[in-house]
Amino acid sequence: MPSLLGTTVIEHLLTTQKAHPEATGAFTRLLSELIVAAKIISREVNKAGLVDILGYAGRENIQGEQVQKLDEFAHRTIVERMAHTGELCAMASEEDPDIIPIPERFPRGNYVLIFDPLDGSSNIDVNVSIGTIFSIYRRVTPMPADPTLEDILQKGSKQVAAGYFVYGSSSMMVYTSGSGVHGFTLLPSIGEFLLSHENIKIPERGRTFSVNEGNYNYWSDEVKKIVSYFKTPDRETKRPYTGRYIGSLVADFHRNLLHGGIFMYPPDKKDPKKPLGKLRLMCECNPLSFVVEQAGGYASTGFQSILDLEPKELHQRVPLYIGSKEDVLIAEQFIKGEGES
Ligand code: AHG
Ligand code: MN
Ligand code: MN
């Protein structure tokens, strides 16, 4: 008897788990707890403006950015909920300089969770979509020793699962565990994420480019040529690409995932401390690159696949060109000096 209200995440996980009998219930438990954390964050996001959850927490994070109260709330919610699942040996967050150990009082597991608790912070108090990005790896150092940075700094291609929540006109969860990309929409009245987008495939080529053109004067000539290419009416359709930039990576990415297009955060000379652009490899670029490749797209640093990058440090930044495969390959050609204007 099919369920009356569509397929819940757990039902969907159990069906895909049948395809992966080796997958224990660990991943299901992890994702279930992550969903509870996301529902709590989503509720706070929706209350933002009515309660004192807005504004700055009065401290800077490792990124040198002002931490918003909601950043801190989201970070704390995920850390506290995920610590007691018994499935993790360590966590890492955009909001914490170091590895986050699992407290002694909780059992340790075989997985590592890396996350951006709140993506799009600059949009928190203007009611624009924001989100949470997560990435799951298997630990590589032997139990029962303490986990090390080696368990955290793994190539994106080693992820066992990744995805994001977007808190917008509706709250959605999009994830992959290596068997395609699936989207679920929160039905607030029953508090369940229900399957709404099964087996998402990104169009081979899009009609949208997303980049912050405010950085134009800090870009290399190659980057300027990419953006000029997408703004030039192309030979077949005689139309340029449409420009769309929300300023929340999850929202820009999600639109391009569903409709096609390319999101770019190129290197710029604006801040000498951030020569490779603003986005973080471990908690933003790797998870979304896993999702986009599972959906048939591609993600590049401009020179190579993001998922093949050997991480050097926890909060390292990388240039990101991500979305429809043909569009990202065009961007790569320009970066490598092979593009045709
Ligand atoms: P976060 O809020 O986690 O720091 O991420 C913000 C990121 C990303 O969401 C977005 O694509 C980018 O910052 C926008 O940066 P600019 O304002 O420099 O364009
Ligand atoms: Mn972010
Ligand atoms: Mn963030």
Image (cartoon, helix red, strand yellow):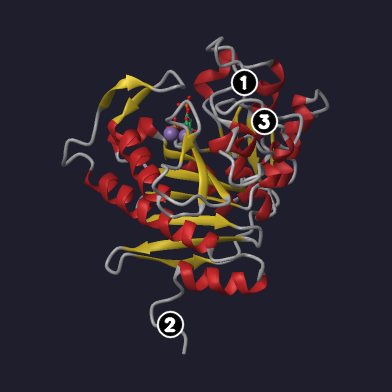
Label 3 neighbour load within 10 Å: few <14, some 14-19, many 20+: some
The residue positioned 49% from the left and 28% from the top of the image is: 98
Foreground residue among 124 and 62: 62
Name the secondary structure under disc 1.
Answer: loop
Q: Look at label 1 and name its amino acid.
A: Leu
Residue at position x 70%, y 52% in the image: 204
Identify residue for label 2. 3
Q: Residue at image x 30%, y 38%?
A: 73
What amino acid is found at the position of numbered circle 3 in the picture? Pro
Q: Are marks 3 and 1 in contact (CB under 8 Å)?
A: no
Measure the alpha-carbon separation of dots 1 and 2.
48 Å
Q: Return the residue at label 1.
A: 276
Query: Viewer-proximal residue, 22 or 265?
Result: 22
Which residue does the image show at 27% across and 26% down from the upper left?
57
Residue 240 in view here: no
Which residue is label 3 attached to?
311
> Could you classify mark 1 by the number of other residues whose Cα lies within 10 Å: few (under 14), some (14-19), or many (20 or more)?
many
